[in-house]
Image (cartoon, grey):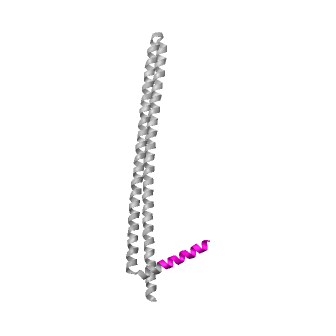
Amino acid sequence: MAERKDTFEDGKAALRDIKDSLAEGSAAVRAGVARAADDAADAAQAAGETAREHGRRAAHAAKAGATAARDSLRDAANDAGAHIMDGVESAQDEIEEGMQEAGDDLEDAVDAGKAAWTQATDAVREVSRDALVSARETLADAREEVRDYIRAKPLGALAAAGAAGFVLALLLRRSR
């Protein structure tokens, strides 16, 4: 009788060890996902800062172009008739250049944002993949421990399974 009790206690201890192993694996997965989320947030923030800087540059270039155009128009009006057409054409060229620069800066900001997003998703994917591999290894180790225990102490394993089934039946019966 004492031997059966010891076997049953050994089975309970083995189940607690398995539960602890699974909890550790779960904690490792959560930590890996949290690290990936932090990396993704950092990458997104960096992309936002880059986009803001490119936007500021574009606004500055547009403002500079507009200021130059206004100045060119004033000079042309003051110089009179024949020079008006030259001033308008010069202003138009400067505005076009300013707009082109603003467009180029905006395109650079979009490309930087896309690159940061790709980098962040790759980081999340890699951490998730590592966490999945770690969880699979933990489960495989736990499965092997259970098999070893069952082979070493089949009566204890049978008693533990019976007890677990009995408790589960009680719980299911109460839930109805």
> Which residue occupies 45% across, 53% down?
37
Looking at the picture, tell me which residue is in the foreground, 3 or 108.
Answer: 3
> Which residue occupies 45% across, 42% down?
49
> Which residue occupies 43% across, 60% down?
31
Magenta stretch, main secondary structure class: helix
Query: Which percent across, then down, holds residue 14?
Result: 43, 76
> Which residue occupies 54% across, 74% down?
168
Residue farthest bottom in this picture: 1
Looking at the picture, tell me which residue is in the foreground, 104 or 154.
Answer: 154
Q: Can you tell which quarter of the image residue 96 is in?
A: top left
Q: Which residues are magenta?
A: 161-176
Query: Which percent across, then down, holds residue 41?
Result: 45, 50
- From what the image shows, is residue 93 above or below residue 150? above
Looking at the picture, tell me which residue is in the foreground, 13 or 147.
Answer: 147
- From what the image shows, is residue 70 above or below residue 107? above
Q: How many marks?
A: 0
Query: Which percent across, then down, holds residue 108?
Result: 41, 37
Q: Is residue 34 magenta?
A: no
Q: Is residue 168 magenta?
A: yes
Query: Which percent across, then down, holds residue 89?
Result: 44, 18
Residue farthest right in this picture: 176
- From what the image shows, is residue 50 above or below residue 27? above
The C terminus - image quarter: bottom right
Q: Can you tell which quarter of the image residue 87 is in?
A: top left
